[in-house]
Image (tube, helix red, strand yellow):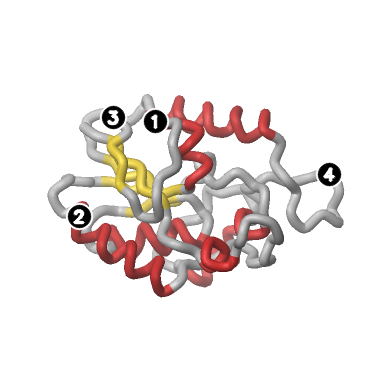
Amino acid sequence: MAIYFIRHGQSEFNAAFQGEVDPIIFDAPLTSLGFDQAARARETIADLGVSRVITSPLTRAIQTAKTIFDGIAPIEVQHGHHELLKFSGDVGRAPDNLRVDFPDLSFDHLPTRWWHSHADADIDVPVEPAESFESRIAGFVARLEEIQNEDVAIVGHGNAFQHIIGFMLNNCQIHRYR
């Protein structure tokens, strides 16, 4: 039994962000390089025996999961290990909107607004407080303990994985968590 963390491929936000000004790309999809990174990761995972995939509901993670695992293992969408909301690229989309782009996946179990929300409705990018992020990630790690007797890949995000393992994964890097 193993759990593998896989960070999504390069997103349009990753490509545009220079470290200061938010390029305002909500729920950023993968770039062509991101799709290429995921295709290369697909070649790498063949020997891992992954039988189940859990992906974040952010578009770049879903696209990465589908590129790597379509036809190999079932993909399920779960929230909890999505990115720390600091920028526009970390703002999600409602399940109904995701369902249009990914009709083969189930989003019925997701709340309408599964990403961090803020009481002030005028804020387009409601920065997630550290305490909220840490609590959310702790809950996700606790759910990982319930995974037994299967090899699982978790497709997610840099800050979420860094909080768990202590370092930042590169795009489409595969890390054995346990």
Q: Nearer the viewer, mark 1 or mark 2?
A: 2
- Give the image quarter of residue 177: top left
Between disc 4 and disc 2, the foreground one is: 2
User: Within 10 Å of the Cα at label 2, are there few (<14), some (14-19), or many (20+) other Cα atoms?
Assistant: few
Secondary structure, mark 3, is: loop
Give the number of the mark in front: 3 or 1: 3
The residues bearing labels 3 and 4 have C-alpha atoms spaced at a distance of 38 Å
Type of amino acid under label 4: Ala
Q: On the image, numbered disc 3 is attached to which residue?
A: 178
Among the two numbered marks 4 and 1 on one chain, the one whose residue lies closer to the N terminus? 4
- State how far apart marks 4 and 1 are (Cα): 30 Å
- Distance in Å between CA atoms under marks 4 and 2: 43 Å
In the visual, does 14 lie left or right of 147?
right
Residue picked out by circle 1: 144
**Given contact means CB atoms under 8 Å apart, are the residues at marks 1 and 2 in contact?**
no
Residue 44: image tag: 2
